[in-house]
Amino acid sequence: MCCTTRTLLVLALTLPGLAPLVADDELATQASWQVFTPDEIRQQLDDWLVEQDAAQAVRQQATALWEKNAADKHLDITERIAAVIALVEPRARPVIKVCQTGATPRAVVQASWLAEDSLPPLARNNLRLLLGRSLVQGSYFDEALEQIDELTIDDVLDRPSLLFYQGVAHHRLLHKERGTEALAQLLENKDVIPRRYAVLAALMRGDLAQIKDGSLDDISRRMQDVERRLGLGRANQRVRDIEDEVIDMLDKLIKEEEKKQCQACQSAAGGAQSARPMRDSMPAGGKGPGQVTKKDIGRTAGWGELPPKQREEAMQEIGRDFPAHYREVIEEYFRELAKQRR
């Protein structure tokens, strides 16, 4: 099994809350684009070499290399395209090598020359696809989108790979609109694209459709994104912004839950009132002195805190309304409040 296939299987197993596959008739529309066959790609590369004034010997070498790599099961069409480009663009060779082992943000810096306008578009765009794809496989989704997000199917030869990896990156970053757009466009040709692309694209598209902004599911995914970024050594402003968004969403959910409980208590209290309430114009006739004893509630730092036993009972009540794996999130939220009080 090649590295790309293993990576796609891992992605399939780790996508949270995947929805069922989209019905076939939902996608039964006329495709707005076509998938190039290997022979069509080879012909376009040969025409490009002619445009670059490549020598006849180089063109013959490209043809031989294309046929040789076709027999290599470890190389896919994107890598075969890059190998031909490297015959006339030597700087592509280090990019190809690093992508075979797994690109990192450091590789992006080293390949900054890909942004040069002097570089022929076919070489620039297809090499950016190769680099962006490798970054997605390494979970560097932000860096990957810097390479491939602005590319269109008219810019590259391996069109299915571009749309698929755009969809994966946007899905993992919770970009619902852009992710859905890329995946829907990919699935226009679901019968001719690689089967693994079609299956995973349908799963991700359905998953994005059922995410509700501000829900516990949404919050959980954002927390996973923070964990991923920290695992990659990221502790920048973007991470802090996501953390702030999570806290705000939790605050909102808790306030909504408190409001519901308050309304329920008021409804219960209203139902317990006498069926014959006293008329406003009639005095109650009470005989008490109208005074109450003031109670000293104390002024210690622990005012308002529940005893450990009652606090645990309260957390169990919370656990009945929320999934078990959110209990730790809620506990951490209250620990943070306690720190702020101190």
Image (cartoon, rainbow, N blue to C red):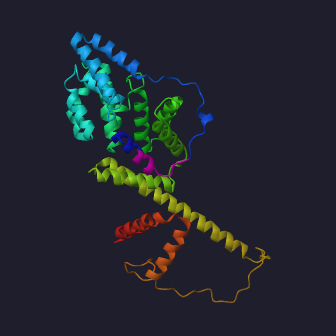
Q: Residue at x 30, y 34 (%)?
A: 131
Residue 316 against residue 204 in the figure, above or below: below
Residue 42 against residue 8 in the figure, above or below: above
Magenta residue check for 204: no
Q: Which residues are magenta?
A: 9-19
Picture quarter with the C terminus: bottom left
The reply to whether residue 17 is visible in this rendering is yes
- Between 172 and 126, the residue placed more toward the observer is 126
Q: Residue at x 43, y 22 (%)?
A: 37
- Between 263 and 2, the residue placed more toward the observer is 2
Residue 280 in the image, given as x and y percentages of width and height:
76, 73
Residue 309 against residue 265 in the figure, above or below: below
Residue 82 in the image, given as x and y percentages of width and height:
29, 26
Picture quarter with the N terminus: top left
Instruction: Please identify the quarter of the rendering in which residue 26 is found.
Output: top right
In-image side of 159 versus 143 (left or right): right
The reply to whether residue 173 is visible in this rendering is no
The number of discs equals 0
- Between 282 and 159, the residue placed more toward the observer is 159
Residue 313 in the image, given as x and y percentages of width and height:
51, 78
Residue 47 in the image, given as x and y percentages of width and height:
33, 12
Q: Residue at x 38, y 69 (%)?
A: 335
